[in-house]
Amino acid sequence: MIKPGTIEDGYIFVGGDPAQEGNWRPVQSVKNEDAAQLTKAKDAATRAQTFGGYAEQFLERNRETGTGWFGPAQGLFPGKSGANIKAMNALQSRAAPMLRQAGDPSTKEMEMYKRGFPSTWNFGDANLEIVKDIRKDTAKAAAKASWLEKWGQTTGSLAGADAAFENWWASRQSPKASNSAPPPIAPPPRPKSGAAAMSDDQIKKALGF
């Protein structure tokens, strides 16, 4: 069964009977400034996926080897040595620069960035909570890139897409997320060749959310 949002031969399916020509619309091309916004979102999603991968690797090591700071007398548990500890520290150093926006961070700034990533100084349960947050961020970045791309393909513009996505994402985080519907969608573009205009419901289906 063909799902709304499916693209074939330059046309996007907006819902209904796929055999009906009127239920397929030409994929819209976004403007240059919108294309840059979409590229930025896709790049952010890629970085988030890489960062999330480092975090998952850290967590796997942490499941095998305990971590945490017990104070000056005891130090790190089970100590600063060991292959897993070294691997976790390497993952932390590799991931830290990805948290900063631009410029060369100071030592203090780098330590602050590292707090957004699991650490050998944290106990395992604390690292797990950090990774859970990273998973949410990774999922959001991927969802946003997909949302913006489908929005642009459907309407030919990204106007209003950011705000609509944030509203939709917030609704998905609520206890009633399973019943949450996508936010109102921007008006459809003018149809070509005398075709009937897409309804708001058709655009919602075309977005696939």
Image: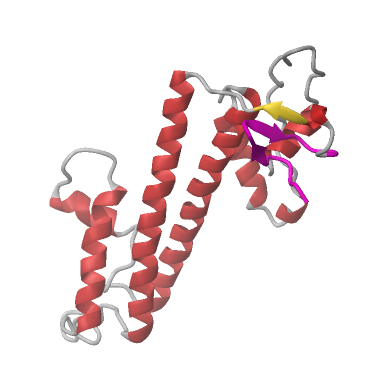
Task: Give the quadrant of residue 85.
Answer: bottom left
- Residue occupying image coordinates x 31% and y 85%: 65
Between residue 171 and residue 148, name the one nearer to us: 148
Q: How far across and how far down the image is residue 106, in percent?
A: 14, 47
Tally of marks: 0
Between residue 119 and residue 143, name the one nearer to us: 143
Between residue 144 and residue 149, name the one nearer to us: 149
Task: Give the quadrant of residue 15.
Answer: top right
- Residue occupying image coordinates x 45% and y 38%: 41
Q: Is residue 67 magenta?
A: no
Between residue 131 and residue 26, name the one nearer to us: 26
Image color mode: secondary structure
- Residue occupying image coordinates x 79% and y 31%: 23
Q: Which residues are magenta?
A: 1-17
Q: How far across and how far down the image is residue 161, in percent?
A: 58, 30
Task: Give the quadrant of residue 123.
Answer: bottom left
Q: Quadrant of the C terminus?
A: top right
- Tell me if 168 is positioned left or right of 120 in this view: right
- Tell me if 15 is positioned left or right of 118 in this view: right
- Tell me if 66 is positioned left or right of 176 in this view: left
Determine if residue 119 is in view.
yes
Q: Is residue 165 above or below residue 95?
A: above
Determine if residue 183 is in view.
no
Q: Is residue 133 above or below residue 78?
A: above
Q: Is residue 8 magenta?
A: yes
- Tell me if 192 is positioned left or right of 50 in this view: right
Q: Is residue 78 above or below residue 207?
A: below
Helix, strand or loop: magenta stretch = loop
- Residue occupying image coordinates x 17% and y 45%: 105
